[in-house]
Image (cartoon, rainbow, N blue to C red):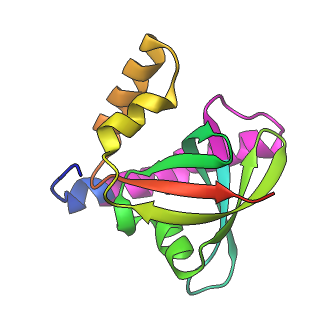
Amino acid sequence: MSTVRDRPTKRRIEILVGRYTVNPLMRLMFRLGVTPPGMALIETLGNRSGVLRHTPVVCSREGETLWLIAQHGAHAGWVRNFQARPEVRVRLGRQWKTGTAELMPDDDVKPRIETFSPSPIGRFITRATFRALESQPVVVRVSIGG
């Protein structure tokens, strides 16, 4: 397991930037029918509010398993949501799939990131992006059921 120290100030800034700039733009792309390569939209039910939440995530698919990295670990809202209710929906391309999400704290993040792109350039970009944005990364597995 990779041990990364918590960086709460960095995490708070990145969560605010993501929540109010990057994530709304990505959700708009999904609404327009444009799915960025290597991305999915995960739908969780709000832990306290009960409202449906849609969060764009970078993913890697292996058969009926979808691998995600929660860059802020259990501090991410979508992670807290699926910890309370593990049933999620994931939009891959133009299709919604149902699944069950779980944190995989014993799965090492760095080797998992290597599976997110088949090309050396893609792996370099993915590694650099995660390294710049992570605060307490944890691997998430979504078992797709239909």
Q: Residue at x 40, y 29 (%)?
A: 114
Residue 24 in the image, given as x and y percentages of width and height: 63, 50
Q: Is residue 27 magenta?
A: yes
Residue 48: name its quadrant.
bottom right
Q: Residue shown at 57%/64% (left/top)?
A: 101
Q: Main secondary structure of the magenta part?
A: helix
Q: Could you tell me how many numbered marks the image carries?
A: 0
Q: Quadrant of residue 58?
A: top right
Q: Nearer the viewer, residue 142 or 57?
A: 142
In the image, taking residue 10 as reference, residue 75 lies left or right, namely: right
Location of residue 66 with respect to 85 vertically, above or below: above
Nearest to the observer: residue 13 or residue 114: 114
Residue depicted at 37% across the width and 68% down the height: 74
| Residue 42 within the segment the image draws in magenta | no
Rendering coords of residue 82 (x, y %): 55, 72
Q: Which residue shows up at 60% across the image and 79% down it? A: 85
Furthest-bottom residue in this view:
48
Region of the chain picked out in magenta, as a range: 12-40
The C terminus lies in which quarter of the figure? Answer: bottom right
In the picture, measured across the screen, residue 146 lies left or right of residue 41, that is: right
Furthest residue to the front?
Answer: 63
Give 113 or 9, whichever is nearer the viewer: 113
Residue 56: percent from left, percent from top = 61, 49
The foreground one among 134 and 11 is: 134
